[in-house]
Amino acid sequence: MALRGVNRVLTGLAGLVLVALGAAVLIGSLDLQRHWGFTLPSAWPFDSPGDVLLGRADRRKWRAEGWWWPAVIAALAVVVLLALWWLLAQLRRARLREVLLNGGDGEPVVLRGSALEEVLSAEAESSAGVERALVVLRGRRVAPEVRVGLTLAPHGSPVTAVRGLSAEVLAHARASTGLSRIPAEVRVGAVRHRAERVG
């Protein structure tokens, strides 16, 4: 399953759990079953304003069992490991490792994503008014996208830099790779420098 699908499933499950828990607390705390005249299943955790999820007797009962604390620790460890896996998957997703290009003979050509990033960064930095450029390749292997961070020199113009990126850097990348389009998200900043005294 793709990472996007995993994200959607996890978000949906979290939403369902939160909605169910919120409904249970709301129905119990407002005593809606008595006000509205309906009955709840016997396993319903809250059925009156004074109910709690685990009473004192239940808590002591489970703590007395020898398997209770190992089970709690194991469950928490699994949750932490799954959360770390999900976080690392998000970080890996930030960069595209390779791009598939049409080789002309029907066989795809694999281009390293880092190589394309370096070429785009170098060409963007050679543009007028650009001090530094950071390019991150994202998207899919057959449809890459770029996120570009441009740091302008004190005399640089944001409009000129963005136009140069679109008309030259990205145009050259499309021509050299054979891709019909390379969508780009551009963020522009300026080099911090001390104010000069005029005196």
Image (spheres, helix red, strand yellow):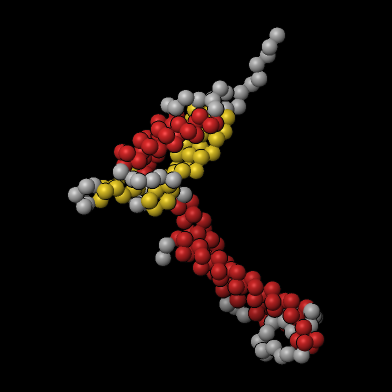
Relative vertical location of residue 185 with respect to residue 153 in this rendering, above or below: below
Q: Nearer the viewer, residue 54 or 47?
A: 47
Seen at 54% across and 31% down, the residue is: 158
Name the spot of residue 58 as percent of width and height, x first. 70, 82
Relative vertical location of residue 152 with respect to residue 34 in this rendering, above or below: above
The C terminus sits in image quarter: top right
Relative vertical location of residue 190 with respect to residue 80 in this rendering, above or below: above
Q: In which quarter of the image is residue 153?
A: top right
Relative vertical location of residue 7 with respect to residue 182 in this rendering, above or below: below
Name the spot of residue 146 as percent of width and height, x first. 44, 44
Seen at 19% across and 49% down, the residue is: 105
Looking at this view, name the residue that lies furthest to the top.
199
Q: Nearer the viewer, residue 175 or 11?
A: 175
Name the spot of residue 42 as percent of width and height, x first. 67, 90
Q: Visible in this render: residue 62?
A: yes
Seen at 62% across and 80% down, the residue is: 65
Name the spot of residue 77 as percent of width and height, x first. 54, 65
Q: Visible in this render: residue 88?
A: no
Seen at 68% across and 84% down, the residue is: 44
Left or right? Give the position of 119 relative to 39: left
Left or right? Give the position of 171 relative to 107: right
Q: Quadrant of residue 75?
A: bottom right
Q: How many marks?
A: 0
Q: Quadrant of residue 3?
A: bottom left
Left or right? Give the position of 42 relative to 103: right
The N terminus sits in image quarter: bottom left
